[in-house]
């Protein structure tokens, strides 16, 4: 939906026309929250990272639109066409404990072998152990993040198609909370959370291997 059209849709419930600025700000905030929680199909990407260019390095810069990694990181050696087990995700503290030698001042002492783990930290993909080759290519799927402000002239308001009622519930929650109408805010927050949980549940059926009968989810 066009930004102004979705605003009209919100007014069907909100009624007040003196809070347009707050309404568009709420749209931006709620869309960001939906993307964060849903890992929506609309914002999933498959990324191929060329890898590490210098032997001894262990960090790879993440894409500029990176939000969250989905699943594991797979590794292929372009030199031998070999494929290795996917990297397991660990947190930064465990990474630091497992691979302190990555900080050795002598680069040759950092080289440990075929990568086994990764962690995401400070917009970097940390690989461990330090790769013993620069011909590894790392592939991972991720969600994008885009926090462009929604305005009246926004051509396509994200989620305003098949999820427009859930997006509206989220906007009404934000608007009423800002006005300190806490009873109504809590009412719409409950609707918004319930809608999100249904989307996430149905999307899981579409992407998981738990059933052979999963179908694309098209609405609540």
Image (cartoon, helix red, strand yellow):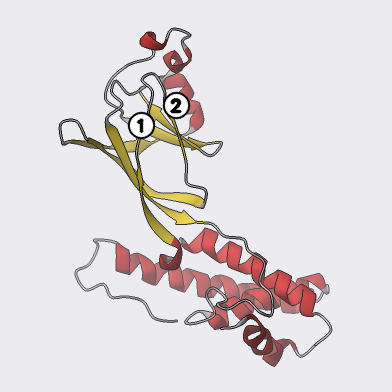
Left or right: where 24 falls relative to 204: right
Left or right: where 21 falls relative to 105: right
**Residue neighbourhood size for the residue with mark 2, other residues' Cα within 10 Å, grouped as few (<14), some (14–19), many (≥20):** some
- Provide residue 149's location: percent of width, then percent of height: 67, 66
Left or right: where 58 falls relative to 148: left
Q: SS at mark 1?
A: strand
- Residue 31: image quadrant is bottom right
Q: Which residue is mark 2?
A: 95
Residue in view at x 63 percent, y 84 percent: 6
Q: Which mark is residue 174?
A: none
Q: With respect to residue 11, does 201 lie above or below? A: above
Mark closest to the chain's N terminus, 2 or 1? 2
Q: With respect to residue 4, does 58 lie above or below? A: above
- Provide residue 126's location: percent of width, then percent of height: 44, 31
Q: Are marks 2 and 1 in contact (CB under 8 Å)?
A: yes
Q: With respect to residue 5, does 195 lie above or below? A: above
């Amino acid at each position: 939906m066009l930004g102004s059209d979705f605003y009209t849709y919100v007014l069907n419930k909100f009624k007040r026309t003196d809070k347009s600025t707050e309404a568009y700000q709420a749209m931006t905030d709620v869309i960001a929250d939906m993307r964060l929680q849903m890992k929506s199909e609309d914002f999933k990407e498959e990324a191929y990272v060329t890898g590490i260019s210098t032997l001894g390095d262990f960090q790879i810069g993440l894409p500029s639109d990176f939000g969250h990694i989905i699943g594991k990181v797979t590794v292929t050696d372009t030199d031998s066409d070999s494929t290795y087990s996917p990297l397991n995700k660990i947190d930064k503290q465990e990474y630091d404990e497992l691979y302190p030698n990555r900080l050795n001042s002598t680069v040759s002492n950092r080289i440990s072998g075929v990568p086994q783990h990764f962690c995401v930290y400070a917009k970097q993909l940390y690989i461990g152990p330090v790769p013993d080759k620069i011909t590894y290519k790392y592939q991972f799927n991720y969600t994008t993040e885009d926090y462009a402000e929604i305005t009246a002239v926004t051509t396509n308001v994200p989620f305003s198609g098949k999820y427009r009622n859930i997006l509206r519930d989220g906007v009404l929650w934000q608007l009423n909370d800002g006005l300190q109408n806490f009873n109504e805010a809590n009412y719409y927050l409950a609707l918004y959370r319930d809608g999100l949980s249904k989307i996430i549940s149905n999307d899981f059926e579409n992407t998981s291997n738990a059933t052979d009968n999963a179908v694309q989810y098209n609405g609540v």
